[in-house]
Image (cartoon, helix red, strand yellow):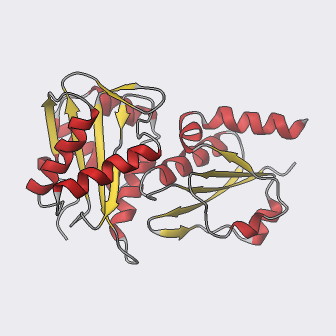
Amino acid sequence: MSKKMIALCACPMGLAHTFMSAEAIRKAAVEMGYDIKVETQGADGIKNELTATDIREAGIIIHAVAVTPLGMERFEGCEVYEVGLQDIIKNPKGIIKEIEEDLAQ
Amino acid sequence: MSEVFTRKHIKLNLDLKDKDAYLRYIANISIELGIGKEEQGVYEGLVNREKEFATNLGDGIAIPHTKSDYILKPAILVLKPQKEVSWGNDAEEDIRIIICILSLNEQGGNTHIELLASLARKLVDEEFKKTLVNTLDEEEIFLMIEQALHS
């Protein structure tokens, strides 16, 4: 499995949970040895946009969203793990481990 | 643009009845501080956002926020209740510090969003949160939030 993880974060106002979840995922992923890229769709628009290459190369794709994000068609046919914003903010490593276990099955 | 966060935006030793009273208080001082345009509009914005999912973070911190035309300029407010305030929708949590984010509805050129985003990113730092929750020192709160906004 590729040690590349990508995530997309978006919340209702795009002020707080988008950036908190992005940072929580980034920190946990780095500590767990992943090459990580996180796109945020916050009040400042789309930042760090995930490209087709990012998506193709990713071993793990996480969506931490509480709204329908833009550009969902990019993920068609991909295995995407949808996680709750509050859950991933509180327990990023635990959730990533669950995803790893799920993928290992 | 005037400052997003100043010492006047910190209110310590508050003794209000419940979560709703704190949201009303935020709306009230937002007018006093020249941040909000209309008290009821700011209050309803905060309440409606809480209805989507409550803004308690799980470690004694709540971050009520709103983005609307009722806000004149972006701001951070920090409130410290004397005693814990119950916050949350399904799982209630005792809150010891309230960090409120008020933002404008605007397109493009959102430089202030970068400040708010820096603060939000800092709010997953356990040490940062622990210190904020425990301190009663206005100057420490001021410096911590100010640095987080510009980190």
Percent position (x, y) of residue A94?
A: 67, 31
**Residue B78 at least partly seen:** yes
Find the residue positioned furthest to the right: A105
- Name the quadrant of the C terminus of chain A: top right
Residue pictured at 56% horizontal, 44% vertical: A85
Q: Is residue A72 above or below residue B83?
A: below
Q: Nearer the viewer, residue B41 or A53?
A: B41
Q: Is residue A52 above or below residue A67?
A: below
Q: Nearer the viewer, residue A4 or B96?
A: B96
Percent position (x, y) of residue A40?
A: 55, 61
Find the residue positioned furthest to the top: B83
Residue pictured at 41% horizontal, 49% vertical: B120
Residue pictured at 12% horizontal, 61% vertical: B34
Residue pictured at 26% horizontal, 62% vertical: B74
Find the residue positioned furthest to the left: B32
Q: Nearer the viewer, residue A41 or B88?
A: B88
Percent position (x, y) of residue A29?
A: 66, 44
